[in-house]
Image (cartoon, grey):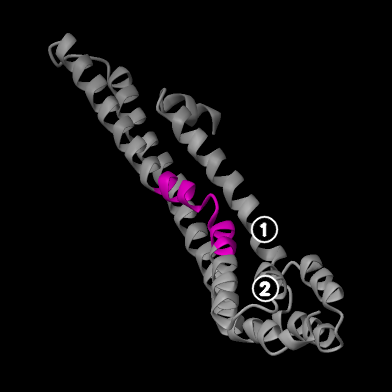
């Protein structure tokens, strides 16, 4: 493996960097997204029970402790109690947008890796082929095949390395986007219930 890496030439180093960055982003996003898989129905039920009992502070604490993507939307709704419905909806919508940005954080880096890694591999291919032609030119086409193979090996190895990094990165990018879409679906489905927590109980606010 190390021998192949070294044969790939200097272009292998930025490709390696791309793989390290992609792996770090995937691990970080997996931890964040999987931790936010708290039961939305259970959270809303607990919060609604506290709100109906007039324990708004307790309801806020329940929401803040939760890892659900609904957490900040619920906090926004509860802190807007007593305001007109349109204002509550706007606060909840803004909180939802902020949550979406948090969920999507660093995903553009994966997109960049998917684009750059194959291009780096292609660059390595071009460099390797140029080296081979330089060898042929310097020796008028008469040269040791082993020397010529160095440039060819560099060309093939960098192409393969770029694809090896890009393909799994693309797969994980798609998977992470799927997790985010599921969170967003829950947020959209529960947004009206969250707004109603504040609006239907506004008379209970002192």
Q: Quadrant of the N terminus?
A: top right
Q: Position of residue 113 (x, y in %)?
A: 44, 44
Magenta portion: prevailing SS class? helix
Q: Is residue 196 left or right of residue 2?
A: right
- Residue at screen point 52% across, 41% down: 19
Q: Which span of residues is magenta-colored?
A: 98-114
Residue at image location 30% in from the left, 37% down from the top = 122
Residue placed most toward the observer, 101 or 1: 101
Q: Earlier in the sequence, mark 2 or mark 1?
A: 1
Residue 13, image x, y percentages: 47, 28
Q: Is residue 110 magenta?
A: yes
**Residue 164 seen anywhere in this rendered image of the structure:** no
Viewer-proximal residue among 119 and 71 = 71
Q: Residues within 10 Å of mark 2 (few under 14, many from 20)?
A: many
Q: Is residue 176 above or below residue 119?
A: below
Q: Which quadrant of the figure contains the C terminus?
A: bottom right
Residue 32's disc number: 1
Q: Is residue 102 visible?
A: yes
Q: Secondary structure at mark 2?
A: loop
- Whether the magenta-drawn stretch holds residue 94 is answered as no
Q: What is the distance, in whole Å, between disc 2 and disc 1 at their CAs?
A: 27 Å
Task: Choose top left, top right, bottom left or bottom right for residue 88.
Answer: bottom right
Q: Is residue 199 above or below residue 114?
A: below
Residue 190 locus on image (x, y percent): 61, 83
Q: Identify the residue under disc 2.
A: 80
- The image quadrant that residue 24 belongs to is top right
Identify the residue at image location x=38%, y=35%.
158
* x 63%, y 82%: residue: 195
Judge depth for marks 2 and 1 and give the one in front. Answer: 2
Q: Is residue 108 above or below residue 126?
A: below
Decide: is 129 above or below 114: above
């Amino acid at each position: 493996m190390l021998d192949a890496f070294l044969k790939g030439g200097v272009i292998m180093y930025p490709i390696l960097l791309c793989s390290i960055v992609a792996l770090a982003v995937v691990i970080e996003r997996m931890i964040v997204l999987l931790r936010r898989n708290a039961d939305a129905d259970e959270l809303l039920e607990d919060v609604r029970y506290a709100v109906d009992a007039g324990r708004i502070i307790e309801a806020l604490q329940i929401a803040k402790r939760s890892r659900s993507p609904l957490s900040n939307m619920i906090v926004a709704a509860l802190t807007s109690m007593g305001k007109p419905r349109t204002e509550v909806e706007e606060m909840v919508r803004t909180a939802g947008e902020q949550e979406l940005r948090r969920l999507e954080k660093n995903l553009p880096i994966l997109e960049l890796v998917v684009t750059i890694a194959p291009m780096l591999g292609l660059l390595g291919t071009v460099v390797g082929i140029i080296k081979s032609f330089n060898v042929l030119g310097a020796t008028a086409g008469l040269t040791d095949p082993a020397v010529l193979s160095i440039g060819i090996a560099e060309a093939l190895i960098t192409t393969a390395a770029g694809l090896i990094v890009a393909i799994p990165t693309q797969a994980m990018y798609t998977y992470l986007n799927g997790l985010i879409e599921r969170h967003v679906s829950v947020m959209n489905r529960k947004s009206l219930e969250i707004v109603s927590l504040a609006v239907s109980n506004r008379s209970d606010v002192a």
